Image (cartoon, helix red, strand yellow):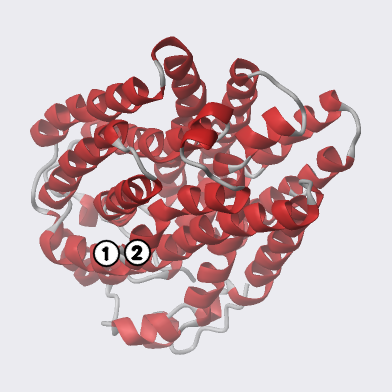
Amino acid sequence: MTNPVTPRAMESGYGGKRRWVIVGLLSLGMIIAYVSRTNISVVLAIPSFIKSFNLSDTGRGMVNSAFFWAYAALQIPAGWVVDRYGVKIPYALSFVFWCMVSAGTAFAHSVTQLVTLRVLLGVAESIVAPASYRWIRCHFIETERGLAVGLYMTGTKIGPAIALPLAAWATMQYGWRPMFLLLGLGGAVWLVPWLLLVKTDDPQTASLVTKEVGEAPVSFGRVMLSPVTWGTVIATFCYMYFVYFCMTWMPAYFVEQRHLSLSKMGSYSFFSFGGMAIVAALAGWAADLMIGRGGNPVTVRKWFTLAGFAIACTELIGAQSSSVSTALVFAVVSLSGLGLATANYWALTQTLVPAASIGRISGVQNCAASLAGIVAPIVTGWLKQETGSYEAPMRAIWFVLALGALSYLLLMREKYAPWASAAEPGSSGGR
């Protein structure tokens, strides 16, 4: 027995179509966020940029990871902010800040300035995921949530899919400084529809949901001690380790190991992340359909997630091949296949966690994702510098993905949900 939310509990002044428009707006906001956080990886593959900042491979890894230092640390506080104050205003203020900081990268003249700006960008964007997941949790029922999360999560894939070729094109046309200025300020137009469409009633919505479905009050401490929370943390770290490798080091891998031009690198990055976005939306919709026909939400979403992890492991086949074509095919297939997990592993968290805690738990989950953003670039840079090739970093990806799949098998079970004993003392779910 899962923790459903009834349609009436979702009524908070939004019509059916308007909810989906706002999901699209949340996805667009995430696209803009990912453009700002991934465009740095393009210039870190340019020899003249590397030379001008005197960067080693380890130094490149540090610059790639700097965004996530503050971003990871602030995920739980950001979740508390949206649980306490709602989504609309905190998100809008943060959005203005990150557009300014992203554009300000154009004026960096030292590694210290570059790193500082990346840290500030992490501060500004820390609100995005907790706010978005909280809004979806409070406005969509279980049989709609996979598609809603899937559509939102396409932004996390379309963002880098667009950012890498767009940043490469803008850099080749105008230089890297104008590229940061253009991409940083261009996204600010998003604020207009956001301020017009989104209401400020979110803090009351979670209380309405909790009351209507009869959720027993669950302390945040109890939620944090649940095996579900720790399974989520481990698996999210493992999922995002691979994703952040692809965002931060895959452009350099394509250029240095497979000898692609900057424009071809952008094209293959586009197909990899674009394929992931399409698969994510379709997988979320398919899981919703199966659940609507009587499938257990925990079981359905968990097996979609495990299938995604399994396909992602095929990256190692491409990495070990001497054929450039084979390597590129598996680079696209592995990341696209991971899209089976994208919507479903986030939706599974929303199924197993009480509504009143979803902002903070989304913050915890995104903190784990952000830690992967710190670790993956640094470990990859260190392994490459120590071994002189990308073989060791690719093997590390396989190990991490296997660990994530194991955590889903053992810990993401209905009987471990933090609300299970309070709401359903006789439950023996364990699926």
Quadrant in the picture for residue 428? bottom right
Q: Which of these two is toward me, 240 or 339?
A: 240
> At 61% across and 42% down in the image, what residue appears?
249
Q: Residue 363 carries which label?
A: 2
> At 44% across and 33% down in the image, what residue appears?
39
Q: Where 370 sits versus 96, above or below?
A: below
Residue type pointed to by label 2: Gly
Q: Name the residue under label 1.
A: 79
Residue 405 location, x and y as percent? 69, 63
Residue 266 as seen in the image, left or right of residue 154: right
Residue 14 location, x and y as percent? 16, 40
Q: Which of these two is toward me, 410 or 322?
A: 322
Callout 1: SS = helix
Q: Which residue lies furthest to the top in this view?
A: 173
Q: Which of these two is toward me, 331 or 48?
A: 48
Q: Where 130 sits versus 153, above or below?
A: below
Residue 165 location, x and y as percent? 51, 21
Residue 269 location, x and y as percent? 60, 28
Residue 427 as seen in the image, left or right of residue 246: left
Callout 2: SS = helix
Mark-to-mark CA distance, 2 and 1: 5 Å
Query: Which quarter of the image is occupied by the C terminus?
Result: bottom right
> At 36% across and 36% down in the image, what residue appears?
36
